[in-house]
């Protein structure tokens, strides 16, 4: 098990080094901070809107359930 973990660790480190090296060569690594910032901004805006939509959806479902319950009587 220890040998497998070492092999996986070496493989992951090698892949990281390769990716960083390629990113530096073709310039995509320089764009990374901008992309991360944009992604974080998008995630923050979505999480601010999502709870409101979830609450509205729950309220609508409860209203439908209540109407169905009263119609059964």
Image (tube, rainbow, N blue to C red):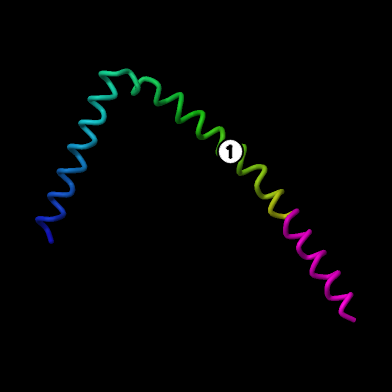
Vertical order, 13 against 5 (above or below): above
**Residue drawn at x 65%, y 47% as measured from the top left:** 50
Q: Please identify the quadrant where the C terminus is shown.
A: bottom right
Disc 1 secondary structure class: helix
Outermost residue toward the bottom in this view: 73
Q: Quadrant of residue 19?
A: top left
Is 47 displayed left or right of 73 in the figure?
left
The secondary structure that most of the magenta stretch takes on is helix
* Location of residue 20 in the rendering, given as x and y in whole percent from the top left corner: 26, 28
Vertical order, 50 against 19 (above or below): below
Outermost residue toward the left in this view: 3
Magenta-tinted stretch: 56-73
Vertical order, 64 against 24 (above or below): below
Vertical order, 31 against 58 (above or below): above
Is 72 displayed left or right of 40 in the figure?
right
Count the marks. 1
**Residue drawn at x 16%, y 54% as measured from the top left:** 5
Q: Please identify the quadrant where the N terminus is shown.
A: bottom left
**Residue drawn at x 86%, y 69% as measured from the top left:** 67
**Residue drawn at x 67%, y 50% as measured from the top left:** 51
- Residue 35 in the magenta stretch? The answer is no
- Residue 61 in the magenta stretch? The answer is yes
Is 71 displayed left or right of 11 in the figure?
right
Is 30 displayed left or right of 16 in the figure?
right
Q: In the rendered image, which residue does mark 1 sit on?
A: 44
For label 1, count other residues whose C-alpha is less than 10 Å away and answer few (under 14), some (14-19) or many (20+): few
* Location of residue 40 in the rendering, given as x and y in whole percent from the top left corner: 51, 35
* Location of residue 36 in the rendering, given as x and y in whole percent from the top left corner: 45, 30
């Amino acid at each position: 098990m220890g040998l497998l973990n070492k092999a996986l660790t070496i493989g992951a480190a090698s892949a990281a080094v390769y990716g960083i090296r390629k990113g530096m060569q073709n310039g995509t690594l320089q764009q990374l901070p901008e992309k991360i910032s944009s992604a974080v901004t998008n995630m923050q805006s979505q999480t601010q809107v999502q709870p409101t939509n979830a609450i509205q959806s729950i309220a609508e479902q409860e209203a439908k359930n209540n109407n169905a319950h009263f119609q059964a009587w």
